[in-house]
Image (tube, rainbow, N blue to C red):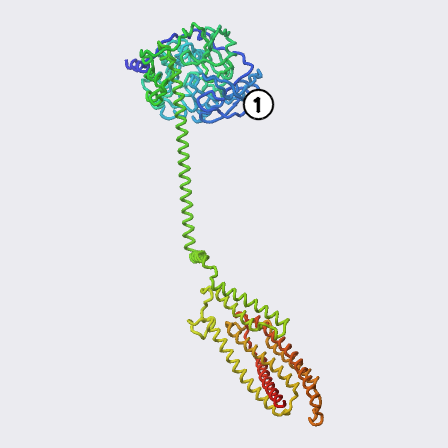
């Protein structure tokens, strides 16, 4: 009794709300075994035959390929496609594919060679000895996708259910009218279907594997039970025939009694579903090592002479399949890919077979019923009663037609499985499924745009945050650099700022400019005086070159003093005059020292001059009282020259001592002693010449006295000769004075004025000048007395 209760509990099935019972029309094609068809002349292989992105091409035109060779590769939802047979790649380009829009997609064009040779295969019969992840990867590499019509990548679906899946459901319901591909596959390849189901159950580690099949397929049920034998690892569940019991949510409800939540997945309740065809493809991929290159396709409809199920290679044009089964098109003939409720009309018969192609329906006009026009909704609620997803099709129709996307989403339009039950029972012939599909497409576009907007906003915010971080980092670096400079080079920075701030004040003021102009004028006067001294006699010179030199030196010193900033000119007093207190101006101290030296030299000269005068007086006392007037004139001229030279020497020495700042160690360009020696030599030569010209034996005046008139003539001649000699001596003296003046000018700057350490020649010149002046006065007085 207990065993009977457990058996009844295991076999229990549930029902779902809604559903319809349209004419099945399956007997047209399910009575004929599967058959092979000749290969077409050309294959058109779309790169995208599943849900997800297309893979990347790994072949090129002109390549020779074998059956099962990958034409694309990828990861995740990027499933590869494989060559359906051996042949040559002709081209890669756009071609119309199996889609209601009739748009073109990228396809690979291939010409078969008729040999149908396989690539080397790698079968794995002992798959249980390998990691489950390797088995999932093999399924992915084989390009297996859901063959029930959805086309979801099987490997991706298995990865999502590796944890938490307790029940694996193999969908063998095939509830839609006309389609018998799964029915015929189970009848002819039941063992392979069961083996594929075992592989899927082992990968998922499912606690139980349920095979749900409708009771309108007795031959398939018998074949499965026979292949299963006494094994209890798989459970065959026979369910009542009702459309759409093959829906994922509906079959889950029938077999487990559980509801998939709105917006959720079956894995949320521990259930995963795979199609019968998918189980067969998994077995071929693992046990045989074959990638998916063909599938079972139902060719049915009253427009086909021989309805049946055939093995169709992927990429075969639909026109080739219909031609092989005796397709006779009628006027305005339509060809539907899929069933009459969920299929769509093909835009052209040149579209190829893809992985989700399970049926090609070519109905006659009578089969499709009357093609009445769409009318207004009468609110009969028949669509709501037939909806297996517990939706409100009438409300969704209004929201979809009116573009009210928010309300359509709020009424769970995404839960619509597009089974077509609502449109089938609608008395107004409203194509409700078409409106739902359009609304879903618009919602997907809105979601995609919102996703892109969020991504763009995230990128913008990330960029703004990055820029802000970079800005803060730069500011931190700048602040750190400022602090480092302030710490390590505070003095230099302050000095630089002071220099920048002092730039406007660095311009010379009016006093400095005036001093510089005076210096330039004094220099010009000096050059003029020197030029006159070289070309003009003394009587015609307007400016004394010695005074001009002194004035120029003084002007330059003043200009330099005015141009120097006080902070740069002031030096510690101890460096200039160690004996002067620190609060004394070093320049004043230097001037006082120079004046002291000048006074000392002048006192020494006065002593020497007095001694020399005394000696000359003593020697002159012994001379005869009579003096030759010519000699007296010559002596007078010499005395005047010497006196003038002495005065120049005194003035030059005083001016030099006044402008010098104590730098007496600099070398002089012209030695004043040499100039004095040259002047003495010139005077000696002049004196010798005068004596040689006029030297005669001394005779008594009474013996050789000429007549008065003749004496006067001779006196006049002597006077003229004496004047000439005096002029020559004067020129010689002036030449010496110019040499000395050049020395004074060269040494007029305070920094370059040398200190005369040996002023003996200057003192001698002063003494000689004093003696000459005394002799001249004496001679003039004697001449006056004689006259």
The quadrant holding residue 780 is bottom right
Whole-percent x and y of residue 365?
44, 6
Tell me the residue that label 1 is attached to: 61
Q: Is residue 553 above or below residue 775?
A: above
Residue nearest the viewer, comparing 207 with 293: 293
* Residue nearer the viewer, 666 or 288: 666
The residue closer to the viewer here, 386 or 505, is 505
Q: Residues within 10 Å of mark 1 (few under 14, many from 20)?
A: few
* Left or right side of 36 for 265: left
764 vs 559, left or right, is: right
Measuring from the top left, give residue 738's x and y in whole percent.
61, 74
Number of callouts: 1
63 relative to 709, above or below: above
Image quadrant occupied by the N terminus = top left
Asked if residue 189 shows in the view, the reply is no
Q: Position of residue 7 (x, y in %)?
A: 31, 14
Query: Is residue 4 toward the left or the right of residue 328 in the image?
Result: left
Residue 331: give x, y in percent of width and height: 48, 6
Q: Is residue 422 above or below residue 649?
A: above
Instruction: Report whether residue 780 is seen.
Output: yes
Q: Quadrant of the C terminus?
A: bottom right
Quarter location, residue 667: bottom right
* Of 43 and 765, the residue lying toward us: 765
SS at circle 1: loop
């Amino acid at each position: 009794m207990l065993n009977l209760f457990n058996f009844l509990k295991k076999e229990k099935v549930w029902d779902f709300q809604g559903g319809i019972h349209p004419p099945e029309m399956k007997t047209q094609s399910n009575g004929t075994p599967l058959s092979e068809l000749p290969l077409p002349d050309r294959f058109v292989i779309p790169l995208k035959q599943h849900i997800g992105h297309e893979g990347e091409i790994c072949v090129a035109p002109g390549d020779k390929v074998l059956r099962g060779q990958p034409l694309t590769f990828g990861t995740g939802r990027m499933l590869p496609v494989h060559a359906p047979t051996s042949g040559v790649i002709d081209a890669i380009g756009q071609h119309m594919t199996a889609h209601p829009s009739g748009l073109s997609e990228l396809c690979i064009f291939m010409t078969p060679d008729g040999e149908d040779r396989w690539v080397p295969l790698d079968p794995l019969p002992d798959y249980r000895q390998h990691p489950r992840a390797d088995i999932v990867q093999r399924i992915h590499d084989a390009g297996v996708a859901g063959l029930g019509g959805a086309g979801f990548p099987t490997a991706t679906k298995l990865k999502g259910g590796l944890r938490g899946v307790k029940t694996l459901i193999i969908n063998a319901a095939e509830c839609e009218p006309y389609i018998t591909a799964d029915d015929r596959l189970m009848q002819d390849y039941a063992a392979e279907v069961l083996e594929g189901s075992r592989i899927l159950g082992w990968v998922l580690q499912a606690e139980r594997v349920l095979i749900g099949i409708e009771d309108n397929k007795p031959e398939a049920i018998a074949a499965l039970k026979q292949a299963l034998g006494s094994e209890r690892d798989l459970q065959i569940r026979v369910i009542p025939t009702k459309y759409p019991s093959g829906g994922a949510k509906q079959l889950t409800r029938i077999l487990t009694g559980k509801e998939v939540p709105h917006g959720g997945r079956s894995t949320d309740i521990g259930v995963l579903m795979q199609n019968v065809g998918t189980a067969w493809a998994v077995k071929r991929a693992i046990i045989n090592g074959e990638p998916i290159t063909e599938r079972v396709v139902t060719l049915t409809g009253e427009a086909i002479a021989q309805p049946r199920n055939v093995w169709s290679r992927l990429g075969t044009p639909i026109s080739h399949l219909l031609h092989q089964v005796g397709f006779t098109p009628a006027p305005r003939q339509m060809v539907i890919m899929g069933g009459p409720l969920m299929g769509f009309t093909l835009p052209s018969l040149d579209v190829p077979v893809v992985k989700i192609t399970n049926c090609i329906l070519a109905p006659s006009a009578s089969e499709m019923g009357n093609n009445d026009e769409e009318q207004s909704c009468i609110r009969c609620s028949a669509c709501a009663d037939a909806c297996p997803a517990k939706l409100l099709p009438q409300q969704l129709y209004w929201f979809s037609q009116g573009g009210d996307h928010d309300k359509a989403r709020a009424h769970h339009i995404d839960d619509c499985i597009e089974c077509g039950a609502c449109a089938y029972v609608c008395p107004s012939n409203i194509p409700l499924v078409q409106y739902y599909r359009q609304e879903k497409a618009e919602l997907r576009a809105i979601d995609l745009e919102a996703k892109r907007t969020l991504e763009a906003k995230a990128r913008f915010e990330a960029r703004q945050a990055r820029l802000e971080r970079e800005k803060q980092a730069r500011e931190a670096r700048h602040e750190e650099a400022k602090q480092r400079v302030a710490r390590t080079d505070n003095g230099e920075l302050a000095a630089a700022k002071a220099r920048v701030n002092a730039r406007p004040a660095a311009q010379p003021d009016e006093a400095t400019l005036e001093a510089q102009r005076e210096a330039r004028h004094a220099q010009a006067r000096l050059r003029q005086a020197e030029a006159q001294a070289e070309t003009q006699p003394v009587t015609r010179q307007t400016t004394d070159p010695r005074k001009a030199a002194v004035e120029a030196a003084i002007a330059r010193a003043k200009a330099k003093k005015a141009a120097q900033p006080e902070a740069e000119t002031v030096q510690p007093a101890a460096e200039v005059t160690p004996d002067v207190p620190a609060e004394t101006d070093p320049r004043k101290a230097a001037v006082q020292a120079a004046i002291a030296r000048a006074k000392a030299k002048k006192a020494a000269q006065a002593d020497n001059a007095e001694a020399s005068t005394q000696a000359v007086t003593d020697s002159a006392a012994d001379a005869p009282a009579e003096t030759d007037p010519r000699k007296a004139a010559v002596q007078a001229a010499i005395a005047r020259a010497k006196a003038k030279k002495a005065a120049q020497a005194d003035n030059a020495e005083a001016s030099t001592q006044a402008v010098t700042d104590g730098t007496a160690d600099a070398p002089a360009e012209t030695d004043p002693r040499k100039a004095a020696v040259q002047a003495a030599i010139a005077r000696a030569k002049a004196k010798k010449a005068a004596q040689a010209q006029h030297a005669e034996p001394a005779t008594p005046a009474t013996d050789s006295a000429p007549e008065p008139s003749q004496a006067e003539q001779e006196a006049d001649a002597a006077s003229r000769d004496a004047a000439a000699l005096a002029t020559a001596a004067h020129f010689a003296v002036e030449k010496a004075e110019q040499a000395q003046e050049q020395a004074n000018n060269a040494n007029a700057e305070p920094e370059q004025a040398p200190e005369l350490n040996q002023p003996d020649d200057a003192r001698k010149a002063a003494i000689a000048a004093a003696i000459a002046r005394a002799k001249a006065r004496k001679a003039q007085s004697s001449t006056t007395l004689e006259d």
